[in-house]
Image (cartoon, coloured by chain):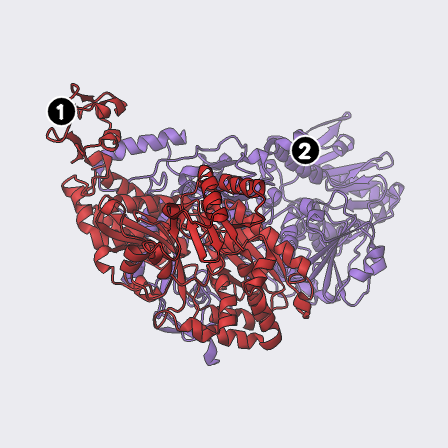
Chain colours: A purple, B red
Amino acid sequence: MDKDNVMKINGKTCEFEPGETILQVATRNNIHIPTLCYLKGAHPTGACRMCVVEVKGAPGPIAACSSPAAKNMEVLTDTPRIIDARKMVVELLLISGNHNCAVRGKYPQDWTDFQQEVETYDRADDICVAYGTCKLQALAYKYMVSERRLDRIPTRYPLEYDDPLVGRDFSRCILCGRCVQACVDVQVNNALSHGYRGNIAKIVVRGDMTLPDSDCVYCGECIQACPVGSLFEKRNRFSSRMWDITQVRTTCYYCGIGCQINLFIKENEIVKVEGVEEAKPNSGRLCFKGRFGFDFIHSGKRLTKPLIKKKGKLSEASWDEALTLIAAKINEIKDKYGPEALGCMVSTKNTNEDLFQAKKFFNNVLSSEQVFHFEPAGYIGIEYEDIKNASTIVIAGADLNRDNPVAASYVKQAVLKGARLIVVDPDQNELSKFAHVRLKSLSGLEKEIRDGTILIHDPDFDVSSVNGKDNLKIYSITRENNTNGAYLMGITPKSDIDLKAYKFIYSMGQNIKDVKSVDFLVVQDVFPGKLQEKADVVLPAAVWVEYDGTYISSDYRVNRVRKAVDPPVEAKPTWLIFKELAGKMGQDWESAREKEIWEQEIIKNISHLEGINYNILAENGVKIKEIEKISFEKTVSTPKGFERPNLHKILAEQCRDLQDIVQKRFKEGK
Amino acid sequence: MKEVRVGLGTCGISAGGEAVYRELKRELKKKKLGIELKETGCMGMCYEEVLVEVLDSEGSHLYAKVTPDRVGKIVDEHIIGNKPVQEWIVRNKTAVDEDVFFDRQKRIVLRNCGIINPASIDEYIAHDGYRAIQKVLSDYSPEDVIDMFIKSGLRGRGGGGFPSGLKWKFARQAKGDKKYIICNADEGDPGAFMDRSVLEGDPHSVLEGMMIAAYTIGADEAYIYVRAEYPLAIKRLITAIKQCEEKGYLGKNIFASDKNLKIKIKEGAGAFVCGEETALIASIEGKRGVPRIRPPFPAQKGLWENPTNINNVETFANVPWIVLNGPEAFAAMGTEKSKGTKVFALAGKIARSGLVEVPMGMSINEIVFQVGGGIKENRQFKAVQMGGPSGGCIPADMGQLQIDYDEITQTGAIMGSGGLIVLDETTCMVDLAKFFLNFTQNESCGKCTFCRIGTKRMLEILERITAGEGKETDIELLEDLAHKIKNSSLCGLGQTAPNPVLTTIKYFREEYEAHIKEKRCPAHNCAALLTYHVDPGKCTGCTLCAKKCPVDAISGKLKEPHTINMEVCIKCGHCFDACRFDAVEKI
């Protein structure tokens, strides 16, 4: 044991790494020090003074969150003097706003007036949105701060409620500054800041305007950071309470990063999404899409029943009827044209289990190799959070702020830490604002490359001219959440395709412009779409929160997705549709659940996944084995006549609609 | 050869100095006297402004309260007729009564103030200016300079009292290619004007001090953070920096050495908290001026994360003197742990308010009664307030206390940057504490809980005490809040904000109790707790009070005693001020 790095906390000898704070050492040693303003991953500000501790030799209490551990330091975390100081912090914060949840004060006669005043202000009969999860409330309870020796400070700033998504209740703000840190230090969106000073201090946007007029991009990081009920999502404000909610951990559906999220479920509905704080790759952070973009799941426009074309018109049918028809048509076409006339265009938004079943069906049941997609693979060879330690970063054509905002946040953090940022093809790329160098093309890049330079390119951006350089690591993020999964399941892209060769096509929402030469078209989708008008059978699919499964993200991490809500009416998971279809074709597949498909079939057949069972994936994702040996196609272009899946468009539109609602400036063309 | 100097610091200008200067210039020109007329900075006797000094073969003659219409007589009788106008002179060889104001002082920091023209680098050079930096550049290594300053015992004059040599040593030892020197000229204490006077009166001494510090720690860039409310000081600094650049004293290869130094001015925007070093750094960086936690200290990670040394104006102004006169000469003055001199801005109920520089170790009584000339209107000396909003009160019966960092700290006050406010029996100590607390809570940045909410709560309690609505438990509550705010606040502003309250409770607890229990203000100051009354024995019925009363609360016939109707009275005090017979009493 290196004697230099030893200290004592409450008599316990603790080792520390140079640079660690007292709070970090204590937390690692299971010694609890209460905090309010401390936000992991951001610079400690020492603002709230809740975490004060006694250090032998120091003249007064010091803040554990921001004080570095030192050799032979002796720390006491719970002396009477410290508890007294913490009690006063709680007391001062409680009187500084409408913290009406706390333990009663000692003047019973004013309770009614007080409560009524709060309710008028709230426009609500209910109590605070954070009741039960509020950190201040918990501390008031813990330290039994019930005495109200001081008068309550009247609320200075009115409730801000004109934003469609986010409410700001300044009467409950304790000015801990976590929201500002989340916005500025973590997401680097720089929308929130501290305004005014002294006891009229306020968290402001753009010189104290309202959210819709600000630079806010609605990542919602601030809401997740707020320890009290000051920042909240309006849509769940009065619809759910903490104790009504079941949380389901799953993986985000939008892009290839694979952010870990907790879905808050009440009565078969998602009411809120939060990032999982301690999990890779996102360490709690989310983007606008991941946090707010789940309305489509509960949309009334979802496909709910199979449809069969009868007399030129699609009409509702039973699953049995639909699958029987498909099986018959498959046999007919296979007999006439051979198995290679049967094709399947998968969507790489599906789970590995879905895709494996599709492939199995075509390969084993139909003897067709024609299962494909049009998506280039992606590869992120480092942990996302290590991006922020990079010294030089090149962004080539990838609009991370738009497509992968969580990755963009790590890049921006790197810039804050002093990294050099080079943006190639900088027009329209919002990251250019942070760039030190802007290049029109890769041709001028050579002289900017230093040892350990990271290049992140758009999957469509050709980087072959800089390929193979020793000091350059080339990465990209897949557009879809499970493209790498599709590759591993053995489904590869096709960039040149002759449609006339196919007489039967099973499309998972993939749009095809000209299907005249196709004899029988099955479209499996979530929403109605253009292609369905030409389909012979339409099958309603369940989406990712409606069944179990796994995804493989761009950093080759296998993540679990979990069933959180029931699918609407008769929509079914893709894997189940294929199992039932196989049954119709006379093959009885044994695996009856996602877990069985994964554990009995997938990981036994694909060596990279060996041993990664659902148990191992119970919490955090697991990186697949021998990543470096995997080489998938990194550039693929969608062939003519094909468009990206219907759902992709719907998700994009949904997010655009939401963004339009919340951001007036888009409408005003600013 | 005669020379005429006019004190044109902010104090001189606000007393009408510019008009006097213009009149002198006109007269001297009209009469073709060919006499040098010079503008200088503050001479220190702010209570006697406008000051005009005439130097002749006999020496110096200092004219006080000069107005443009007195100029003609001074020029005719003294300058032309060689007969000084004795009745207007406050200081020369024969005017003994005011001598003690200067004679008890020891002027190191203020050595050139009021003597040289601050806009002239040549005059500064003629007064040994820029000799110290050249000596340092040619004769001393940075380590030598550090040793010299550790030996001198110079401590930070901004209030903290940290040994300057040691501070330089830390910055010198800190790893980094780029280092900064910052001069803290964000003088914000109410009633303090030491730094302003030095910058206005002798800006080059500060620049020279900064050059020496920059050489010592290895900095090639420096900032002066000066409050925008000091336009004259800024003007003087801009001129001085420009002159230095022209002479090659600043810029590349200064004084033909291999050292570079660029000094920039950053104007503050009026926040008191920006005098706190980490907030000041944030402000220079263009960020919101809020303190951050230390460590890391600026010596390790300061401006733009680079090692930075911050000293205040007075500290820097001491530096060239110490180099030229030696650390021993400096250390010979003062007490064991507080060496050299200290500049004070005397204000309040003192006869001679102004700027003084006294050796450390002088007692408070000496400053008040000898240098300061005692209390105005022969009232009773009650206390001094030192250190502004961060400081506290020291009662008159502790007047023997020496000016010494540690002794003053023990009383609960602090040395501070040099504000010294003298209080007499008409000062209500609760009201005084309220004044300072109001200042700090307004100037709190709002970041940490204790300072943001705690000081506001304390202020409210003081407000209700002075309004006669104090509760029995209030003193206890104040003390509880004060101790916790002091112990646990984030920065120096919060940690010292309760000092004015704590010291007044400590030394004048009975005044608090009188307000709370007897609903009485012993100093007859708190409007809510006093009534006005006309003493019929003294009232001559002159009717002046009745005429001044804005609410017609006073009635009475001419030449008959008047009475005040307290139900109408708004306690504005106009009658009290108006009465020439002391007939109006506060009870």
- Find residue A583 and name its label: none
Q: What residue does disc 1 label?
A: B561
**Residue A540 shown left or right of residue B92 in the figure:** right
Q: Is residue A561 visible?
A: no
Residue B206 percent coordinates (x, y):
53, 60
Q: Is residue A130 visible?
A: yes
Residue type indicated by callout 2: Lys
Farthest front residue?
B81
- Residue B466, quarter of picture: top left
Residue type indicated by callout 1: Pro
Position of A563 relative to B468 (above/below): below
Label 1 chain ID: B
* Helix, strand or loop under label 1: loop
Label 2 chain ID: A
Q: Nearer the viewer, mark 1 or mark 2?
A: 1
Query: Is the residue marked by circle 1 packed among few (<14), some (14-19), or many (20+) residues within 10 Å?
Result: some
The answer to whether dots 1 and 2 both sit on one chain is: no
Q: What residue does disc 2 label?
A: A670
Residue B172 percent coordinates (x, y):
55, 71
Residue B399 percent coordinates (x, y):
25, 59
Foreground pick, A489 / A643: A643
On-image quarter of the N terminus of chain B: bottom right
Q: State how far apart marks 1 and 2 are (Cα).
A: 76 Å
Farthest left residue?
B537
Residue A254 percent coordinates (x, y):
65, 46
Position of B585 relative to B95 (above/below): above
Foreground pick, B322 / B118: B118
